[in-house]
């Protein structure tokens, strides 16, 4: 939800900071005080159109910052993390509008784009008012709203999964139909390449083993000569190291027989003699295994040359060449069995088409039943909101082919006046009517992923008992979502959990908008102003107290 809004140099606002809480919040004030500017600020945070005309006279840029609280586990949090946007329970969004045209967007403290901001904002806040085209004006949302109302989203998801299988099978068939001649050419190429890799009979790590063997074969003579010479020096020739060491051991033994302090040295010499003897025997055995085999070297070179050519043609490693060969074998099998594969795919497509028709038909029937119930529920609600003769309809357009969302699209139609046929909302609903329609929808289907709702002009054209009913309904909506409402009616404001006064002040010869939280007698005074205008009497004040007490409930 929105917990903090800061505005600088926007229209007649110099500097403004407003903290918000959960529940139902109203903003009231005289006409022209700047309430609409706050809506403009929120609209900028949502990615709305920016204009240099919004910048306060004398300033070069205007800034709007908003902080949203994001509870742990909210899907948006995971999306932000994937996008590299920091979010530790709160998300900072900032919009800067400049006269130079260098407008900037910041999300989570980092520079971002307007498209990303708009995408994120859709999951954070919605505005319903005269100049907004939000959820209800986007026809694409109507089917989702209807499915949500009818509890059909699980059925829709099951249908969508089935449609995904259907589309995937259809794509495979189309790929299979991409020309027999092209398939034949492809098969010839694959057969040649697969045979070349198959006949090479590569094994993982073979190139590394061959390179090591090649090194040994190339230097075989040197390895044999050096190992033999080393053996002779240690063991084989007259006066070898081991013979000389034996003489040294004898001398030290004679000394140790007299002076026992040299016994550790004698033991060390014995150990050294054993190690040198092991080394000499290892060199002898190594020399016996060394080959200077030109025939084998030629074969190794040929094998390495083959592997190098295959790497150049197919993949940089032996393992990847083997994997590529296996992939080609599978494709060859598919191409060689086109008729059998096509038959299997056709059968699968027909089965999926029938299942899709059955599941889609079930979804369509339930949608029409839900549309009938939604019509009744919406008309019941809007008739209570000073639109006694208004009509609400759900119109369906059936698609020639099944789509991911179902067999049809839905659009909400509305008629505010008797004798007029219902028409699309975008062509007929005013701002106040749109706000009341959204309020009615929130009554009949309160579930929503958007945590903050802003209602502007929801009370346009109503009064008396109807306005009190609007306030009560907004209060009810606020139990599940944060509700912000700009209103001129005390009957609506009486139900608020939090009340802010928006007013113009003249300081230093300049006009500025201020927002003040109201409580106690200050709130009573503002309510009395809304009730009685310029002249506020004791009776008006008492009436205001009664309204606030009644709106807060027992």
Image (cartoon, rainbow, N blue to C red):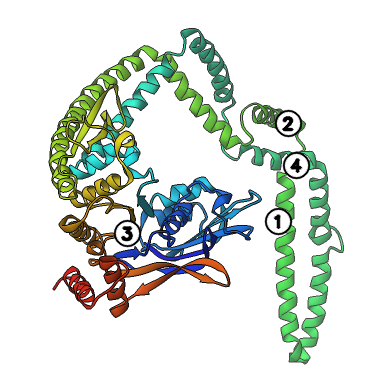
Point out which mark residue 301 bears: 2
Tags 3 and 2 touching, CB below 8 Å = no
Q: Are marks 1 and 4 in contact (CB under 8 Å)?
A: no
Mark with earlier residue (1, 4): 4
Mark before the other along the chain sequence, 4 or 3: 4
Instruction: Report the side of 3 relative to 115 (left or right).
Output: left
Report helix, strand or loop for mark 3.
Answer: strand
Q: Which sits in the foreground, 328 or 548?
A: 548
Mark 1, residue position: 282
Identify the mark nearer the N-term, 3 or 1: 1
Real-space CA distance between mark 2 and mark 4, rounded to the nearest whole angstrom: 11 Å
Residue 269 seen by the camera: yes
Q: To which quarter of the image does residue 477 belong?
A: bottom left
Tag 3 residue: 485
Depth-wise, is mark 2 or mark 1 nearer the camera?
Answer: 2
Pinpoint residue 405: horizontal percent, then vertical percent. 29, 33
Q: Quadrant of the C terminus?
A: bottom left
| 399 or 410, nearer to the observer | 410
Q: Work out how far the residue at label 3 is from the one at label 1, CA to CA, in angstroms.
A: 92 Å
Between disc 2 and disc 4, whose residue precedes? 4
Residue at (30% x, 60% y) in the render: 488
Reading the image, the residue beneath label 4 is: 215
Q: How many angstroms separate mark 2 from mark 1 (CA)?
A: 29 Å
Horizontal and vertical percent position of residue 439? 24, 51
**Is 491 located above or below residue 322 in the figure?**
below
Q: Depth check: give the residue in front, 134 or 182.
A: 134
For the N terminus, the quadrant is bottom left
């Amino acid at each position: 939800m929105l917990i903090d809004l800061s505005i600088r140099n926007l229209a007649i606002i110099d500097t403004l900071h407003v903290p918000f809480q959960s529940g139902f919040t109203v903003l009231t004030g005289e006409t022209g005080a700047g309430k609409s500017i706050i809506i403009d600020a929120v609209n900028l945070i949502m990615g709305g159109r920016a204009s240099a005309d919004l910048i306060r006279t004398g300033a070069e840029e205007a800034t709007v910052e908003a902080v949203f609280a994001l509870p742990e586990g909210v899907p948006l949090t995971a999306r932000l993390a994937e996008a590299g946007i920091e979010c530790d329970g709160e998300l900072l969004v900032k919009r800067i509008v400049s006269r130079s045209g260098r407008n900037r967007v910041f999300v989570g403290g980092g520079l971002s784009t307007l498209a990303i901001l708009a995408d994120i904002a859709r999951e954070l806040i919605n505005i319903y008012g005269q100049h907004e085209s939000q959820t209800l004006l986007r026809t694409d949302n109507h089917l989702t709203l209807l499915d949500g109302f009818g509890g059909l989203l699980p059925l829709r998801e099951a249908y969508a999964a089935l449609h995904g299988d259907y589309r995937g099978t259809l794509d495979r068939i189309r790929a299979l139909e991409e020309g027999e001649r092209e398939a034949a050419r492809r098969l010839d190429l694959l057969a040649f390449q697969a045979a070349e890799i198959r006949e090479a009979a590569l094994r993982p790590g073979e190139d590394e083993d061959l390179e090591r063997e090649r090194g040994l074969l190339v230097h075989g003579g040197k390895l044999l000569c050096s190992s033999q010479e080393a053996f002779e020096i240690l063991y084989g020739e007259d006066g070898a190291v081991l013979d000389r060491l034996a003489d040294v051991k004898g001398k030290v033994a004679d000394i140790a027989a007299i002076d026992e302090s040299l016994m550790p040295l004698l033991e060390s010499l014995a150990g050294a003699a054993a190690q040198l003897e092991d080394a000499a025997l290892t060199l002898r055995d190594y020399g016996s295994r060394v080959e200077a085999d030109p025939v084998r070297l030629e074969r190794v070179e040929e094998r390495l040359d083959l592997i190098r050519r295959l790497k150049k043609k197919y993949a940089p490693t032996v393992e990847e060449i083997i994997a590529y060969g296996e992939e080609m074998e599978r494709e060859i099998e598919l191409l060689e069995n086109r008729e059998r594969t096509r038959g299997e795919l056709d059968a699968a497509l027909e089965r999926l088409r029938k299942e899709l028709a059955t599941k889609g038909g079930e979804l369509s029937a339930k949608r029409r039943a839900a549309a009938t119930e939604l019509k009744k529920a919406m008309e019941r609600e809007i008739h209570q909101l000073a639109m006694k003769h208004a009509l609400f309809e759900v119109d369906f357009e059936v698609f020639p082919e099944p789509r991911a969302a179902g067999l049809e699209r839905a659009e909400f139609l509305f008629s505010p006046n008797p004798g007029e046929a219902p028409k699309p909302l975008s062509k007929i609903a005013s701002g106040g009517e749109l706000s009341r329609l959204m309020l009615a929808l929130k009554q009949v289907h309160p579930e929503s992923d958007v945590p903050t709702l802003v209602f502007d002009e929801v009370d346009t054209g109503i009064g008396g008992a109807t306005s009190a009913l609007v306030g009560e309904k907004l209060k009810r909506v606020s139990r599940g979502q944060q509700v912000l409402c700009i209103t001129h009616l005390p009957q609506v404001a009486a139900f608020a959990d939090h009340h802010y006064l928006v007013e113009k002040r003249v300081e230093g010869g300049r006009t500025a908008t201020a927002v003040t939280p109201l409580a106690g007698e200050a709130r009573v005074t503002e309510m009395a102003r809304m009730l009685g205008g310029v002249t506020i009497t004791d009776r008006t004040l008492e009436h205001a107290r009664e309204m606030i007490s009644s709106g807060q409930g027992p």
